[in-house]
Image (spheres, rainbow, N blue to C red):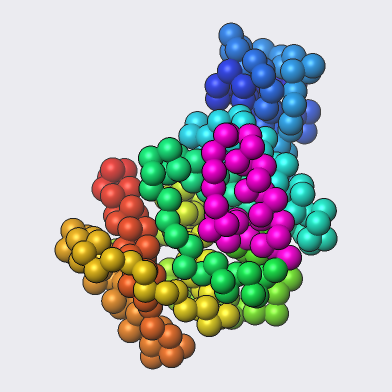
Amino acid sequence: MRIKSVINNNVVLVNTNDEDECVLVGRGIGFSKKPGEFVEEDRIQKKFLLADKGTMAKFSRILNEVTSEELLVTSKIISMARQELKVKLSESIYISLTDHIHYVIERYHQGKLMTNTFLWDIKRYYPKEFEVALKAVHLINKKFNIKLKDDEAGYIAFHFINATNDIGEDGNTALLTKLVHEIINIVSLNLDMVIDSSDISSYRFITHVKFFSQRLIKRMQSADETESDLFNLVRNKYEKSYKIVKKIDLFLNKEYQYSMSKNDQLYFMMHIHRLIAHEKLNK
């Protein structure tokens, strides 16, 4: 296989014989290599060949941000989840979970980990997913010599759940799709921008909306553990984002009899602000 681009010393993007893109991970596989050169087959530790070209393109975009170790751990976790949960998982989990693991490790070293206010509900509604997620946290802790807690298992469990819903194995799939579309539409109209999942910032926002929508359908209300000072600080700093969040809250109150907690609002404000910042940067 010929190299299409070198991501770093341990990750390269290649074209297969069928001209499909494939990500190869291996120690030193990209060292001193240039596009057009052949890959040393004995260096390949893992191949990532996703059937959907759109998903593959998005996966390729995050490779500059993550490490080869994070890619390999994510792949191991996904394989474990498929085997133990006995479900099909959408290929999108390679993007969302890799991205999530990268940033949670980063936040751990910065001392910025968040408490999972939905942990009890996740254990109650998704015990199998949570059990596998606990094993995933153990793998991450062991590989990166860190000490993530059960809160993180709750977040990882939601990635499993989301990847299952993406391929229509849940009875609430139609409602979930409708709700996600409605929330995204409110944000899109108020920002006068297209929220396209091919863009990484938009993809992260859409993933957050899916998680939130799943909780709403299950009536898993977030505990208001956000400090008032922090909430007020973000609200005043991101005034435009806050106004959009209040419109979402009013809509959910009217249509679904659901009130967003301060915790929910805080996360939405931060995600919407990132969309605004990304849009300005690319104009």
Q: Quadrant of the N terminus?
A: top right
Q: How many marks?
A: 0
The residue segment tinted magenta is 128-157
Q: Is residue 32 left or right of residue 81?
A: left
User: Looking at the image, which is closer to me, 179 or 267?
Assistant: 267
Residue 144 shows in this picture:
yes
User: Looking at the image, which is closer to me, 239 or 154?
Assistant: 154
Q: Does residue 59 sit above or below 96 in this rendering?
A: above
Is-magenta flag for residue 152? yes
Residue farthest left in this picture: 236
Q: Report x, y in % for residue 163.
A: 66, 60
Q: Residue at x 62, y 25 (%)?
A: 11
Residue 89 quadrant: bottom right
User: Looking at the image, which is closer to me, 267 or 58?
Assistant: 267
Q: Is residue 209 left or right of residue 166?
A: left
Q: Residue at x 38, y 83 (%)?
A: 259
Q: Report x, y in % for residue 251.
A: 37, 84
Q: Does residue 106 sit above or below 179 in this rendering?
A: above
Q: Quadrant of the C terminus?
A: top left
User: Looking at the image, which is closer to me, 53 or 83?
Assistant: 83
- Magenta span: predominant SS is helix
Q: Residue at x 67, y 12 (%)?
A: 37
Residue 178 quadrant: bottom right
Residue farthest top in this picture: 32
Q: Does residue 194 sit above or below 178 in this rendering?
A: above
Q: Does residue 23 sit above or below 10 in this rendering?
A: below
Residue 190 shows in this picture:
no
Is-magenta flag for residue 112? no
Q: Report x, y in % for residue 127.
A: 70, 68
